[in-house]
Image (spheres, rainbow, N blue to C red):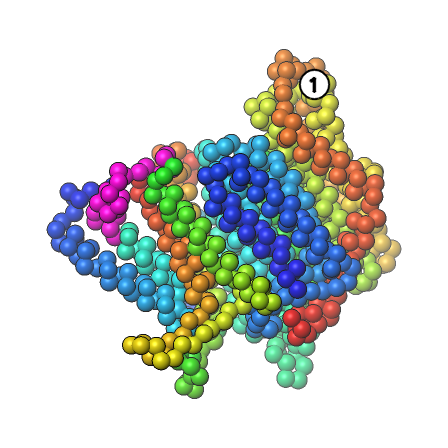
Amino acid sequence: MSVVVAPMLIALGTAILTLGIRFAPRVQRAVSVLGAVCYAGAVAVLGLRVVPDTVLAYQLSGWQAPYGITLVADSLSVFMLGIAAIVSLAAIVFSTRFINEIGQSVSYHPLFHFMLVGISGSFLTGDIFNLFVWFEVMLMPSYVLVVFTGGSEQTDAALKYTALNLIGSAVMLLAIGGLYSTTGTLNMADISMRLANAGSEGAAIGDPTPVLGLAALLLAVFALKAGIVPFQFWVPSAYKAAPAPATAMLAGVTKKVGVYAIIRLYFTVFAAGTLPQAIALPGFSGTGFLGFFGPILFVLATASILVGGVAAVSRPDLDGVFAYSSIGQVGFIILPLAVAATVSDPAIRALGIVAALVYSLNHALAKSLLFMLSGSLHEGLGSVKLADLGGLSRAQPLTSGSFFVGALALVGIPPLTGFFGKLLVFDTAGRAMAAGATEAWLALAVALVGAILTIAYMSRAWNRGFWGEPSELIANVRLSPVLLGVVVVLAVLIVALGVGFEPVYTTAEAGADAALDRSGYIDAVLGGEA
Amino acid sequence: MTTDHDTTVIARTVARVVFPIIVVTAIALLLQGHNLPGGGFIAGTLTAAAVGLVYVIYGLDHLEQELLGRPPSVPFTDEAGITREYGSLVTTGLALAAGGGAVAILFGDAFLTQAVWFFEHVPVYGEFEVASALAFDLGVYAVVVGALLTILAVVGAE
Amino acid sequence: MTQFVLAVVLGLLFALGTFLVLRKDLVRVVWGLTIMSQTANVYLVTMGGLTGGVPIISGHGGQGTEVTDPLVQALVLTAIVIGFGTTAFALGLSYRVYQTNETIDLTEVRG
């Protein structure tokens, strides 16, 4: 059973070990990379045990749920852990060459692995307060990573990032306190069960209406973590300030923790709730909790896609384009979730979650590729301003090829993973429309505009930065082979996962089924077997 | 940073008296933390407060110069300085806390599972119990003391 | 009655925290954040219900007195530790801002 806790323990062990041997830099780097490899291995083993339809519950320190803290591994968690494993392995290899010697020996590796501990904990926990704790464990190292290179720009960005997240933490505490007081439990499975029984004879919850409001409060926190408009202020400056591999983690994985929390809590836990009386609001009528969040998620997603896309078109440098693009891309992840929350057909709902998961994977891979590529260009050239680049496609065919793959993956060209992500998003909206949810044409329209914006900013970055006559500087630039190697490997991975898409789809489908299989989740956690 | 020329005799004398009291209280809190109010974090902050008092009254370098008998170090510039020792304290504490939890896995229990042993007829003390949670608490204690004193040393040096 | 007074006090504290966060003096902003997170902690304690009992069954077996829900207290302890760490970091960060910009006026820092 320890396989559930293994990824977390490996990351924790690596963090402590790299802290202990920080005065032997070579050993430390080796241990750090080895730790990331072991982490990926542990996730793979966990995946083999869990996918497609097993739910493993692990009662920490042997206290039975709902009294103790439970870790739950199902296909959804494992899919997310897989994303974390791939991106962190790539980022840590990249870091060994990218971060300067002093930085690495001071604290970089321990911080990185502590962040990974927090990320794994967030994906695995089955307790809502524990989720708060893991969020903080993940955030604290990320604050330090944002300020890592220590310039005034970094301090500024970290301040914004820290302040917003401190408010987010306070709000999350409020919501959790309220949930405890109204439901009498913090265990997610238990909350879900009590919500389902609410109002009946002898139930723990008499009137579930307050839970709806508290869930809405929590949504703001998760939206902040995922960097969705209107909580996106911290994204561009923090992504620009953090060292490239840390940005890759922030954009590729930390954001997905917010997405995961939305899927897990709203589709698995709060979906169990129904209002005692039907209410009618614009875009929502009925009693289901989940349906209430559909229009909200839709507005957030639309705003993210538009704000992110429009801002990305006019950025003067690669980092800026990528940072704003990641706001827009998270919108693309939330959009199918909004549709899934609105419709009641379980098949379309599952399809929406599959779309969100596949898109998350694609965004994690493509964005970490692009950020690390921008990082290696920054190291080689000292600038990633589009005006200073120009002509890279002739001077650096391999770099440009990788950028091309990453850009096309975001745009969604077959056979890359991005194509399937986009296809599934459109498919979800289309099927919802066919099934009678006429409002889904809005989602289709937004997705279409978003796709056009993506093409616009990516082709602009390509035209300005990679085409044209190479300048003297560009023609003679030497990029570090290790850095370039990581980027190229990620590009190859995007192509490979796109060509061999079948297993990715089956895993994502298993993840979506796990997210919607409420009774399976509750049975596994509260069933009593440790 | 304050040096010993700036503080009064009263402050210096009081600090000498208060320091051991704080530390003993901290240790008492640490040991009783298993089933009474107390524990690693509180004990750690108290201990750090005690050392912080010494820093304030006697100056940052006093600890190294007078007590450890070596020239004062500048944080983060030389490798063998006091911050490195605090750093090792944090590392040891983390390893102790995590390792203490992981031992349970070796016995086939869940991570962080704790045990408790009772010793009866111990001379002087009578009945005596040792909880394995003490290892975790000790770890937390070391982390808190190490981290807080690092902050004090680094911020104090600026 | 206690509930009502506490609710008012919590509201006032949150208002104070929000007011401070909106100032342009960086140190006040950090204080505002601290007040907000501490208020959230107080709120958490009240969520466990106020019975006036102690949160702990002291000694082995307990004396059968009325016990306050200990879970919220454990949550608050955790939240305090976390808040402690982040506040320390935020204060360090504001010192850094002061060092690099020689001002803690946020309108000048961002400019």
> Which residue has dot 1 on it?
A395
Q: Position of residue A227 (x, y in %)?
A: 60, 47
Camera-side residue of C12 and A27: A27
- Disc tally is 1
The amino acid type, in three-letter code, at marker 1 is Ala
Q: Residue at x 83, y 60 (%)?
A: A347
Label 1: which secondary element: helix
Q: Residue at x 43, y 86 (%)?
A: C64
Camera-side residue of A64 and C17: A64
> Residue B126 appears in which quarter of the rendering?
bottom left
Q: Position of residue A290 (x, y in %)?
A: 70, 63
Q: Position of residue B51 (x, y in %)?
A: 28, 52
- Establish if A166 lies above or below C61: above
Q: Would residue A455 be seen by someone viewing this image from the given angle? A: no
Q: Residue at x 50, y 36 (%)?
A: A25
Q: Is residue B62 magenta?
A: yes
- Establish if B114 lies above or below C98: below
Seen as rendered, the residue at the extreme top is: A472
Q: Quadrant of the C terminus of chain A?
A: bottom right
Q: Position of residue A353 (x, y in %)?
A: 75, 55
> Residue A123 appears in which quarter of the rendering?
bottom right
The chain identifier of the residue carrying mark 1 reads: A
> Residue B129 appears in which quarter of the rendering?
bottom left
User: What crowding class fits label 1: few (fewer than 14 Cα within 10 Å), some (14-19), or many (20 or more)?
Assistant: many
Left-right relation of B106 to C64: right
In this picture, which residue range is highlighted in magenta?
B53-78
